[in-house]
Image: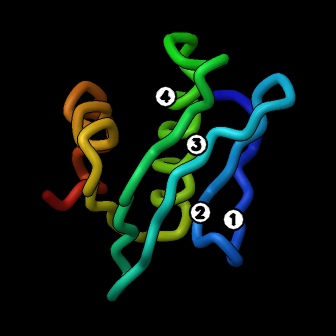
């Protein structure tokens, strides 16, 4: 896992810094479920695993907080399918 994630309440997103760039996941929470609406990595970081690193940190946060997660965006859904270690936290 990379750098820690922080929650940006103003923009309702979780952020992680990678080499001076911000990778983020727009989210909303309802009834203890974190909905992952959109995951973004700047062009400079695409293909380098930055978004995956963010997803890993985000799912560890979900686990720590006793929540569940629902992927809304295609990237988050695909990532969670490839990472069965988080199946117990995922509601689809």
Label 4's element?
helix
Q: Please give left or right for residue 46 compared with residue 38 in the image.
A: right
Tell me whether the residue at label 1 lies in contact with that at label 2, contact meaning CB atoms closer than 8 angstroms. Answer: yes
Q: Position of residue 30 (x, y in %)?
A: 35, 84
Seen at 71% across and 43% down, the residue is 16
- State which mark lies toward you, 2 or 4: 2
Which of the two labelled residues, at mark 2 and mark 3, occupies the earlier sequence position? 2
- The foreground one among 11 and 90 is 11
User: What is the C-alpha distance between the residues marked 3 and 4?
Assistant: 9 Å
Q: Which residue is identified by label 3?
A: 57
Which of the two labelled residues, at mark 3 and mark 1, occupies the earlier sequence position? 1
Seen at 50% across and 11% down, the residue is 47
- State which mark lies toward you, 3 or 1: 1
In the displayed structure, 41 sits above or below 86; it is: above
Q: Which residue is identified by label 2?
A: 13
- State which mark lies toward you, 2 or 3: 2
User: What is the C-alpha distance between the residues marked 2 and 4?
Assistant: 16 Å
Q: Position of residue 44 (x, y in %)?
A: 66, 17
User: What is the C-alpha distance between the residues marked 3 and 1?
Assistant: 12 Å
């Amino acid at each position: 896992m990379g750098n820690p994630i922080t929650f940006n309440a103003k923009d309702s997103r979780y952020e992680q810094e990678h080499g001076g760039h911000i990778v983020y996941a727009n989210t909303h929470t309802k009834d203890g479920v974190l909905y992952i609406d959109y995951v973004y990595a700047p062009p400079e970081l695409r293909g380098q695993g930055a978004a995956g690193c963010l997803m890993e940190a985000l799912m560890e946060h979900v686990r720590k907080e006793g929540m569940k997660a629902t992927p809304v965006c295609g990237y988050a859904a695909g990532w969670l399918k490839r990472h069965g270690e988080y199946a117990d936290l995922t509601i689809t």
